[in-house]
Image (cartoon, rainbow, N blue to C red):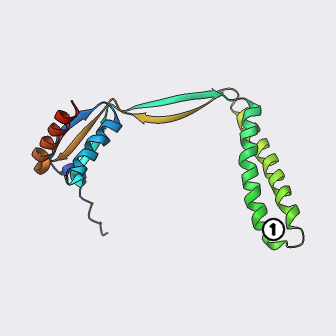
């Protein structure tokens, strides 16, 4: 059995942390500053530390709300199918699109309402999830550490 060679591990390169920032935007700003001063930014990495999952609750999910969202999704699917079918029905193309849109909306509303009812109230809310880090380290390869530190010190002096 032939085994393909493994790609080089990017973490195997010796790296040095040249700055720690409270937000991702601040770390990006530092990399942008390095880039503006001709630093080879391909040697820089932003590393998020102390990751946590943040789920933001957007609102309550009810069966009518689920049905409305399903109807909207189904209507778009109906529009797509109707557009494709209208290519092959030149006599009544103007009738195909509204019929498939309505059928898609009805099917989507029914499917979404049944899916929500099947949960039996175990998850009656909508939410979004994202990862957030407590801090962001800016690391560079060891051979570029001194140059990065010098430039970031100039930035800190200039920003004060």
Residue placed under numbered mark 1 in the picture? 86
Quarter of the image that includes the N terminus = bottom left
Whole-percent x and y of residue 120?
A: 70, 28
The answer to which image quadrant residue 111 occupies is top right
Q: How many marks?
A: 1
Quarter of the image that includes the C terminus = top left
Whole-percent x and y of residue 114?
A: 76, 38
- Camera sees residue 97: yes
In the image, is residue 41 above or below residue 113? below
Kindly identify the residue that appears in the image at 26 percent across and 64 percent down: 5
Kindly identify the residue that appears in the image at 79 percent across and 48 percent down: 105
The answer to which image quadrant residue 146 occupies is top left
Does 110 sit left or right of 158 as displayed?
right
In the image, is residue 6 above or below residue 29? below
The answer to which image quadrant residue 134 occupies is top left
- Camera sees residue 123: no
Q: Residues within 10 Å of mark 1 (few under 14, many from 20)?
A: some
Of 153 and 13, the residue lying toward us = 153
Of 27 and 125, the residue lying toward us = 27
Whole-percent x and y of residue 49?
A: 30, 34
Of 135 and 157, the residue lying toward us = 157
Name the element at disc 1. Answer: helix
Whole-percent x and y of residue 12?
A: 19, 50
């Amino acid at each position: 059995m032939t085994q393909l060679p493994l790609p080089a591990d990017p973490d195997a390169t010796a790296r040095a942390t040249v700055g720690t920032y409270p937000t991702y935007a601040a770390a990006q700003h530092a990399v942008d500053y390095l880039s503006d001063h001709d630093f080879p930014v391909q040697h820089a990495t932003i590393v998020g530390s102390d990751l946590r999952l943040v789920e933001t609750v957007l609102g309550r999910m009810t069966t009518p709300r689920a049905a409305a969202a399903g109807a909207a999704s189904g209507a778009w699917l109906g529009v797509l199918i109707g557009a494709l079918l209208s290519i092959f029905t030149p006599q009544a193309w103007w009738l195909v699109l509204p019929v498939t849109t309505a059928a898609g909306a009805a099917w989507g509303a029914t499917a979404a309402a049944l899916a929500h009812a099947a949960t039996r109230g175990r998850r009656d809310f909508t939410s979004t999830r994202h990862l957030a880090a407590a801090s962001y380290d800016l690391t560079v390869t060891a051979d570029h550490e001194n140059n990065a530190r010098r430039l970031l010190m100039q930035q800190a002096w200039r920003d004060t």
